[in-house]
Image (cartoon, rainbow, N blue to C red):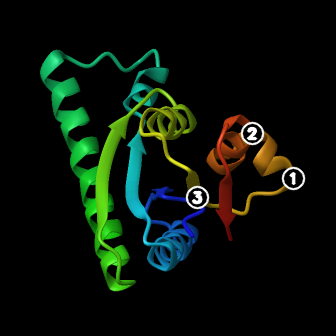
Amino acid sequence: MQVFPKILVAYDGSENATRALRLGARIAKLQESALTVINVYTFALLYTSPDFSPTGETIQALEGALREKAQEIVDRGVEIAREEGVTAKGEVADSESEVEGILDFAEKGKFDLIVIGSRGLTGFKKLVLGSVSSGVVSHSTIPVLIVK
């Protein structure tokens, strides 16, 4: 019985994200579910400094570099899923917020489960830095599995 026919794994290449990906792949394999690995990059963060006013060419180069790095991360994620015996689709998305990017993609793709790694931030660090996994679980309308 397929409880989660479409599984989305948010993958940033970190250790916790890799554990989440491996678990998501195992669930997908057990249920014969479709698995998608996504990396969301946030290009908008480059504009937070008033001293930074890039030219059009610089903007294109920076965005291209970010997209290329995100694609490398996704490609590695797809390979990890393959190591777990699952064929996965890889996606790269840009968004002003990683949380919004993951949630928008999950909603548009009609996914049944989001699997994401926890950074393990606690106390003051979590309050100041925020957490993508906390944001996803707080705002998602579908089940979210957070893996440590």
Q: CA distance from mark 1 to mark 2?
A: 17 Å
Residue in front for this viewpoint, 116 or 24: 24
Q: Earlier in the sequence, mark 3 or mark 1?
A: 3
Q: Secondary structure at mark 3?
A: strand
Residue 138 marker = 2
Which residue corresponds to the image point at 44% horizontal and 32% vertical from the top-left? 108
Residue 10 marker = none
Which residue corresponds to the image point at 47% horizontal and 35% vertical from the top-left? 101
Residue 2 position by quadrant: bottom right
- Name the quarter where the N terminus is drawn: bottom right
Residue 73 horizontal/vertical position (percent): 32, 60
Residue 39 horizontal/vertical position (percent): 39, 50
Which residue corresponds to the image point at 40% horizontal and 62% vertical from the top-left? 35
Q: Horizontal placement of 69 versus 24: left or right? A: left
Q: Amino acid at mark 1?
A: Gly
Q: Nearer the viewer, mark 3 or mark 1?
A: 3
Is mark 3 in CB contact (under 8 Å) with mark 2? no
Q: Secondary structure at mark 2?
A: helix
Q: Earlier in the sequence, mark 1 or mark 2?
A: 1
Residue 42 position by quadrant: top left
The relative height of residue 29 versus residue 78 in the rendered view (above or below) is below
Q: Amino acid at mark 3?
A: Ile
Farthest residue in the right direction? 123
Residue under pointer 3: 116
Q: Residues within 10 Å of mark 3 (few under 14, many from 20)?
A: many
Residue 123 marker = 1
Q: Earlier in the sequence, mark 3 or mark 2?
A: 3
Q: Residues within 10 Å of mark 1 (few under 14, many from 20)?
A: few
The relative height of residue 74 versus residue 106 in the rendered view (above or below) is below
Q: Amino acid at mark 2?
A: Ser
Residue 9 horizontal/vertical position (percent): 48, 58
